[in-house]
Amino acid sequence: MLDQALPLHGVAVAPAALPLFAGRQRELDLIYAHVAGPQRGHVAVSGPLGIGKTRLLRQVADPRMVASRGLFPERHLFVGLDLQSVTPFSGTRFWRRVAQLMQRQSPRPQVAGAIDQLLSRGDLDIMDVEALLDAAAAEDQVLVLLLDELEWALQADDPRSAAASRDFLAQTASLARRSPRALSLVTASDKPLHETTREVEGWRGSPFATVFTPLPLGPLDLAAAADYLDRALARAGLAARSLARAPILDLAAGQPAPLEAAAFSLQRHRGSETSALAISQEALQAVRDALAHLNALTSLREPGRLASRPAALPPSSPSHSSTPARGLWMDPTGGEVLFNGRRIDCLTSLEYSLLRLLYGQPGRLCSKETIVRHVWGAEHRQDGAVEAVEESRVEKLVSRLRHKIEPVPGRPQLLRTVRGRGYRYVPLN
C-alpha cells in the first residue's frame, strides 16, 4: 500500500511525500516489474489527451517512488525525455540528448567513459549506442528510458524524415532485443503503439510494437479520484470545510486533467475566507473549462472529426458562407481562427503571430530568421543571423502551434518543415 510509510535508503517516507495519483497502482506495478526484472522489459503506455500519460512517466521516475520500490539511483538511471525537445528529430540528436541526461546522474566509471566517447563522435550509429549499453551491463547499471510524445519521432512530412523515423524504430527495436540486461523502454503515445508506428511509411521487418507490453490508460476509479481531491483539499487547508465534492468528481469522471484543474482552483483559496459554496462552484467551473479545452484540442488531433455545432461567428466576422467548411481559416483583422468550422481560442500571442505570418503567404517558404524578426522583433538578431537559442525557440513555437491546429501533430499537414530552411503553410485541398 502506498499509503504506508516506505523506506528511502533507510529513512521512512511519509505517505504525503509520495507523488500524487497513487491510484495508478496497477500501472506502476506493471512498469516497475519490467524495469526491475532480471531480463528487463518494455512498456508502451497509451491513452487520449489529458488521461495522465506524462504524469505517469514522471511518477515512475520520481526518486521517492523509485526508492519506495526498492530501486536505487546507483544502479537504475531513469532518463525522462519529451521527444518534442529533440528538434528536428534524428537518431543522432536523440542519443546525444540521452547521453547528456545520463551524465547528470553520476554514472559508474565505465559508463561515464562510454558516454564521453559517444558524445565525441560526429554522426552516431547503432554500434556507438551498443557500446554504451555494453558498458552499462558490465557495470550492472540499467538505463530506463521514459519517452513521452513518441509521435514526434515518427513525423513523415517528407521522404527524408520518414527514413529517419524508420531508422529510429529499427535501431531502437534492435537495441531493446539485444540489451535486455541494460535497457528498459517505456513509451507514451495517444494511440496504441502498433497504431502509432503504422503511420511510418515503408516500414519493413518485425513490427516495432512486438517488444513492448501494451498499457492503455483509462480514467481513475472513484476511490483514486476522491483520494486525489482529498489530498488537494488538505494541501489547501480546506479539508475541514463542507465542500461539495460529489459534483466535481461526477463531472471529472476520473480524468486526471480536469481533476488537476480542480486542485489548482482549490489551492488558490489557501488561507482565504471564501465560502465553501463559492470554492466548490469555482472548482466545478475549473473542471468544465478543462473538459472543454480537452475536447477542443482532441477534435483537432482527430482527422475528420467536426464539432456537432460550430461556434457562431460574431457579427464583425465574415459570414459562414465565406469561410471554408474544411481546413484552416483565419481573419487577420478580427482575430478569428477556425479549423473545420470549429473556433480555436487557445492560441497565445506568439502562436497567433506565427500563424498569421505563415497563413498570409500560403505555399511560400518562411525562414527561421524571418520568423524571429516577425514574432520576436529585430533585436533578437545578431550579425544578420539567427542564434542557436533562437532557432530552438522557433522550433518549439512551431511544435506548440502544430499541437493546437494540426489534426495529427506528428504528421503535420498544414505547417510543413523544409529541412534546414524553415517552414511553409500548405492549405488543405
Image (cartoon, rainbow, N blue to C red):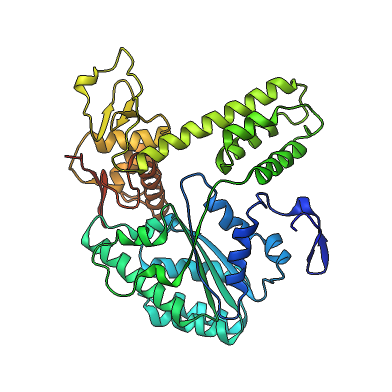
Q: Quadrant of residue 261?
A: top right
User: Residue 22: x percent and y percent?
Assistant: 67, 52
Q: Quadrant of residue 28?
A: bottom right
| In the image, residue 193 above or below residue 42 | above
| In the image, residue 350 above or below residue 179 | above
User: Residue 83: x percent and y percent?
Assistant: 44, 58
Quadrant placement of the C terminus: top left
Which residue is drawn at the image coordinates 46% and 69% (left, top)? 212
Q: Confirm whether residue 389 shows in the render.
A: yes
Which residue is drawn at the image coordinates 36% and 33% (left, top)? 352
> Residue 350 vs residue 267: left or right?
left
User: Residue 367: x percent and y percent?
Assistant: 26, 47
User: Residue 191: x percent and y percent?
Assistant: 41, 54
Which residue is drawn at the image coordinates 27% and 68% (left, top)? 203
Q: Quadrant of residue 298?
A: top left
Q: Confirm whether residue 377 shows in the render.
A: no
> Residue 393 vs residue 368: left or right?
right
